[in-house]
Amino acid sequence: MSPVEALYYGLAALGLMAFLSVMVLALTWGERKALARIQMRMGPMRVGLHGTLQPVADVMKLVLKEDILPSWADRRIYWAAPLAVFVPAFLVWVTIPVSRDVVIRNMDVGLFYVVAITALSVLGLVMAGWGSANKYAILGGLRAAGQLISYEVPFIMAALAVAMLSQSLDLTEIVDGQAVFANALVQPLGLFLFFTAGLAELGRTPFDIHHAESEVVGGPFVEYSGAHWAVFFLAEYVNTFTIAALTVLLFFGGWRWPDVPFDGGVHTALSVLWFMVKTYAVILVIFWVRGTYPRLRIDQLMAFGWKLLVPLSFANIVLTGVVLFYGWPLWTLTVLSLGLLGGAFYLISILPGRGPSRMTVAVRPARDLRTRAAGSSASGVDSR
Amino acid sequence: MIGFLDSLLVTVRTALRRPVTAQYPDPSKRQPVAEGFMGFPALTWDEDVREPYCTGCMVCVRDCPTQCMSAVMDDNPKHAEGASRRRKIVREFEINLGRCILCGICVDVCNFDAIEMSHEHELSKYERNGNRVDLTRLLEMGRAYQRETGWGPSQPKKNSGVPVEKPAGEREKSAGGAAGR
Amino acid sequence: MQFQQQPAQQADSLDLMVNMGPQHPSTHGVFRLVIWIDGERIVRAEPHIGYLHRGSEKLCEGEQYGQIITLFDRLDYVSNLNCELAFCLTVEKLMGLEVPDRASCIRVVLCELNRIASHMLFYGVFGLDAGAMTPILYGFRERERVQSLFERVTGARMMHNYIRVGGVKEDLPSDFAERLGELTALLRAGIDECDELLTNNELFLSRTKGVGAIGGSEGVDYGLSGPSLRAAGVAEDVRVSEPYSIYDRFDYGIPVGTYGDCFDRYYVRMEEMRQSLRIVDQAMEQMEPGPVSAKVRRIARPPKGEAYLRTESPRGDFGVYLVSDGSDKPYRVKVRAPSFANLQALQRLLRGAYVADAVVILGSIDIVLGEVDR
């Protein structure tokens, strides 16, 4: 590696770090504000205008807080875990293009690299769970392992179908393939699978079982505090941003669709802006889902992953393959995909019982019960 | 409608409405306390004779379920001068507001309209014993409450401290009786 | 890591003992639940109570009847008025007091509103237990509205000390009917919105359907009462079976579940809120001007004797047993707290459930620790 190249990558790493940190700060503020709106609150309002400096204050607090090491903890694993989570989250961004020219290093196998690297972060969570020597942490760590590995399958499968459609693993080419119409229009099922599996990969509601506050009290992170917890937090939000960016790249045409009608520097700036707008729209949906849904249970999570998402993602690949092989027009894929998506929604809606079996509570008039209580003269207890 | 999409609609509908909360210390958005709100107990002030209604009779002290108050009774110098009808007057009165449970029993039992649940409700103080308030503070709270609500005693005739215009001899007799006791 | 070997029945399995609480965020107060888990399944559960024990029953023996009402406020601190009512009714029963009609109507209106406020809190924390973070704020929005009305009437948002022996403390404010009308309209819309957010959501259904189910007769055996028992299909409501105050006058419905699972327990409460609104409306119609308190001496001195009275608090059968020795202080006060009795079924409900279900089941029986530990 020449000194110029080394300098370039060094500066790029620094720039990336700065970029991601700013994005994370924006995300934390955005999440708190979005949830506040959903819950009819105002959210952070004190630090800066409408609380815009709140994330900075949070970072200050976290960095200044004491780092606590539990006395039973496995010291090396405990301290290494945040890094093991953060480094993959960071590395993914080496190849994610924000615009055609704004990327550190475009790779031919960009998509492959991304899914390969994201799979590593599970290690850090298990390490954190084990190293903390805490029962909640170990429960959370093992839940995380099970969940992340299971949802890796539909996640990759959905991405694969997109790669089939664009005949490339290069993220820039995938975006270019969507110049006319986005993949979301062709593969609505793929979008659903990717987004849902992505939520599970992030461990966000409704799949946040590994750090479920009401059950395992933060899971692997329960013992962490201060700067180390901040690193976990940073990684979590970087991952959120990554998944949203990937959704935009793979399904919403990245910085294209519809194209920005300019040239040169203006084009780059506008396309970056366009990409960001789309990404934040996806992130807003993630927050919206978080503000609405309860969380799944571990067995339901596994069932949902293996029994619904995995078969559907295989079906998605087969459909895409068939349409591509026979050279059918792409709208047939849209129709077939929508059909399968409708089927999936139907399956989800009948899972906990539909129709009369769903509502099991009936209102009985007090008048009838009174006469019966008077008639039987007993305590009025009707043990069926 | 499929339920999980329905829920999303509910949340987006509420997100488009205005928040129901307001920034806390903003005085303009502060929810006013209701008229009958029971804040901390406070001692009322008799403007006519410039002294508290309280005679330090200890009824409230005895009836308080949490024993949060204490009082000391004294002879009323104004009574000796003939300026007030109250023979006895409160000298010291302390309420530990941190201990008070705002039940209002002291108000119910008071025979002199001397204690009233004010609208004061801020419990944060800068000192450890900041919630132990003395007579001066209690009267301040009471006067603020009186100004705010235009409070008047429920039995004005009985409890007013204004000396009743009686024939001179009788007045001297009653004054003498008090002094002799 | 510390593992605990389970000596007796599960000698072959290496169960992990997990302490939930008293600092766990979803134990609804200071409740400690020790669970032995095999993977994600609960093998055995052991509730530990007493962290909030204040000796209320013993304290009652040293207080006058009027002062005890403030202690009852703090038993079930989510539905204070219902507890006040239970105590006052018991004292009145012992004294043979006739309460003026207006006072009874006021009591019923406020107690039913309090039931709604209490169930709204249940709705919120139940959603939180299931992992949804928004219901608690919707629930609290409605609860705050009810409490604002209480503030107007009783002077306090929670610890009211409003219902007194022989009636109520003071008459309603002049604009009460108008404000109540606004409130009930808002509540109806609010309850429907809360209902819509969770009830049909498949994720919520899958978390609650068939979880922690208990049959009717078994529920009776465990001493369940209130919504938890009605969810199991037993149409037992003290307001109907042993009407107290003026509850026999109203026309309302008793929601009854089928399977006694978490969903039924949840929805029985949702439906109960609507029925409570019906009672409120009828009680307002029947309210007529008049005195709000019977003629009683300030310090009540019930005659020598004893009395027991059951009422339907939002959590179930709330009974007060009172022994008087003729003085101004009771000789003995015993409270039959529904939360405490309902908690007995917890061990049975948790057996074989998942760890995540433990939280939901505990939430669905809706305990209030102030009442459990007293």
Image (cartoon, coloured by chain):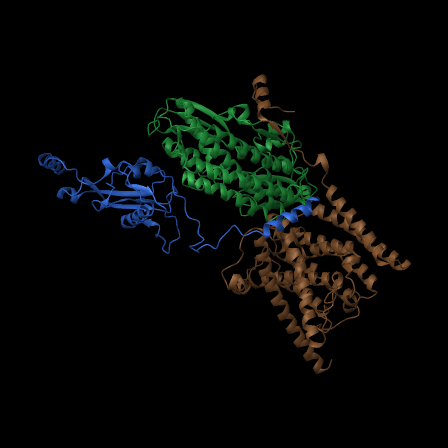
Residue A212 in view in this figure: yes
Q: Position of residue A85 (x, y in %)?
A: 66, 62
B176 vs C306, nearest the viewer? B176
Query: Dividing the picture into quarters, in which one does residue B34 lie?
Result: top left
Residue occupying image coordinates x 81% and y 55%: A334
* Residue A339 left/right relative to B139: right
Query: Dividing the picture into quarters, in which one does residue C100 lie?
Result: top left
A2 vs C231, nearest the viewer? C231
Residue occupying image coordinates x 53% and y 45%: C141
Task: Please tell me whether residue A190 is drawn above or below residue A171 in the rendered image.
Answer: above
Q: Position of residue A150 (x, y in %)?
A: 75, 53
Q: Tell me, what hue is chain A?
A: brown
Task: Please tell me whether residue A119 is drawn above or below residue A217 in the rendered image.
Answer: below
* Residue A117 left/right relative to B46: right
Q: Residue furthest right?
A: A326
Q: In which quadrant of the rendered image does the N terminus of chain A lie?
A: bottom right
Chain drawn green in the picture: C
A138 vs A325, nearest the viewer? A325
Q: Position of residue A145 (x, y in %)?
A: 70, 54
Q: Residue furthest bottom?
A: A3
Task: Please tell me whether residue A280 is drawn above or below residue C317 in the rendered image.
Answer: below
Residue occupying image coordinates x 48% and y 39%: C370
Chain drawn blue in the picture: B
Q: Position of residue B168 (x, y in %)?
A: 9, 37
Residue C62 in view in this figure: no
* Residue A242 left/right relative to B170: right
Residue occupying image coordinates x 69% and y 55%: A199
Query: Dividing the picture into quarters, in which one does residue A260 lie?
Result: bottom right
Q: In which quadrant of the rendered image does the C terminus of chain A lie?
A: top right
